Image (cartoon, rainbow, N blue to C red):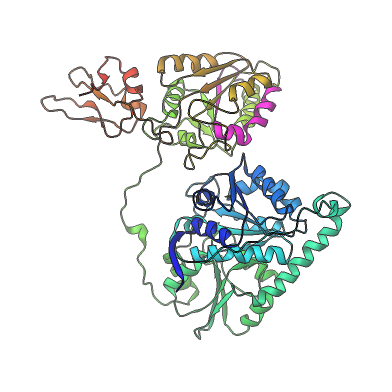
Amino acid sequence: MSKKEILSGNQAIARGFYEAGGMVATAYPGSPTVDVIESMKSEYSDDIYSEFSMNEKVALEVGIGSCYGGLRTLVTMKHVGVNICMDPSMSFTQSPIDAGFMLVSGDDPGMSSSQNEQDNRILGKFANMAIFDPADSQDAKDYVKAGLDISEEYQMPVMMRITSRICHARSLVEIGQREEKMGPKFSGKPSLSCMLPPHTFKHQYTMKERIEKLQEAANDLSINKLEEYGSDSLVITSGICYYNFKEVCPDVDVLKLGMVYPLPIDKIKNLAKKYSKVIVIEEMMPFIENELKLNGIDCVGKEYFSFTNELHSEVIEEGLLKIGVLKERKLLDPAKDDTTARGPLFCAGCPHRPVFDILKKSKVTVVGDIGCYTMGLLYPWEVLKVNISMGASLGIIKGLRYAMDKQGDVDKPVVGVIGDGTFFHSGIPGFANLQYQLKGDENITMIVLDNATTAMTGGQPTGESFHMDQTGQDISIEATLRNMGFDDIQVIDQFNYKEAKEAIVGATKRKGVSVILTSRPCALRYKVKETPFEVDPTICIGCKTCIKTNCPPLRMKKYYGIEKLKSSIDPNQCVGCGICAQVCPVGAIKRKESK
């Protein structure tokens, strides 16, 4: 009897890579795929070398090296991370390879934790990679092995496109044994691994030929499964859409695609002749639909199903009603149920809180970046005015400063914020570029929010070993910036509110580039917890100055015998940062005495 376990999609990918004889796994942490490498590290470290690399480009390049060296390799990242590694990937995919290589792209329909909703099946095709699209955890595990086998058989890198829903959902997975797999040693032949002319010209034909061969083989590929029930319509789908569709229409013929590029075109052409309608159900872009239409297969899709967000069962039901496959609605629309909204917020004791409180009160223009501090654009802070992508704050602030000066806003301060993780990911080139000032005296302040971890994705190390603990670094951000030529640098303790405010406000008034480095660690990652504070309601004047720091433990409440609402602190949430006590104008907030 086979052993089965309940695994998330991320855990199943890690398990599949282990069973397939995988040897090297690299990544940059980004939701929804973080737990793939976390699982590798916790469960399979004896057999698999895994790392969180400096950024996605470096992760891919480490993977390219291990693949060239004959080791089965998996590289994983969120969908926007694929943008970072497209430069090496577009050249690497020209290479004929001997060891299996899979790139896992964590797509995010509905943008639950992302700045855009790009469909990386398009990038997979653009890079001439086969693309796999799992529907549950069992698929995720199975497709890793199937993808690596195909990668080796056709000597091509492959992609698995997995979505947030599959990454985090759990289902039963059949557990197998590890099969050791080792490819040939590094050949050192420039024609195989030097992707420059004249070698690359012939590989354009190589890529075309292997896709054509795989497209022919796809007609008999076992992970492309046809289910027949005798209906006059055929649904073609993949991923989570398959199960959402089955919940609505269990008795309509369906072709569930495991590999969505290249498609089994000949098989679909023959099938289409049997049906009055061919319906494509897929999340985001009409990728499968367009592939079918390019090959002369008549089908419908996005005119009935949204091009954005997740396609839940009730959304699919609505589309099938419009097409005429269904005659009546059976599912309730969850949008009609009242739910309490809870937006993201900084943790209690988060070291970013006092910085954003100071910036909000300073009324300066702030350019944001990607990290926990991105929440500075949301209520109640609403401080950030620009937020695009990782490391973008530095280039944007330079261009914006130039434009503001041209528009007559020379005296208006502009501030950028970037975290330590993003600094190492893609901030260093921006700082180097910022050193080449337009005139040399433009007023720019950059704040590096160094909390000693990659906090927003679960507290992964910054790079891998840059922060050895919460007080020290292998690579000093301050020393790096000074070596670049920056000299107006201050390191502050942002929990010393008065001095932090003086430093930040003072920097915004000086000409040239000023850099502020904050020094408090992530409260959650390092489990920061000191004696909490409490309010003396007989002293509190109810001015709400402390409340306006927007710390979760603080709220106004009614005290017995006191008519006016006064401030209060929930001791179960307070971690003892002390910002509220420092801003209180009457000294009503003090640290609790130990009993």
Above or below — where is 586 with respect to 385?
above
Q: Position of residue 105 (x, y in %)?
A: 59, 54
**Image quarter for residue 587?**
top left
Q: 224 and 40: which one is in front?
A: 40
Q: Percent position (x, y) of residue 293?
A: 66, 70
When asked about the image quadrant of residue 244, the answer is bottom left
Please indicate whether residue 498 sits to the left or right of residue 62 in the image: left
Residue furthest to the left in view is 561
Front position in the image: 132 or 284:
132
Residue ranking furthest to the right: 198
At a point 66% along the width and 15% down the height, the residue shown is 441
Q: Is residue 265 left or right of residue 18?
A: right
- Asked if residue 309 shows in the view, the reply is no
Q: Quadrant of the N terminus?
A: bottom left
Closer-to-camera residue (542/36): 36
What's the residue at 51%, 48% (across, down)?
31
Q: Which residues are magenta?
A: 408-436
Residue 513 can be seen in this image: yes
Q: Quadrant of residue 146?
A: bottom right
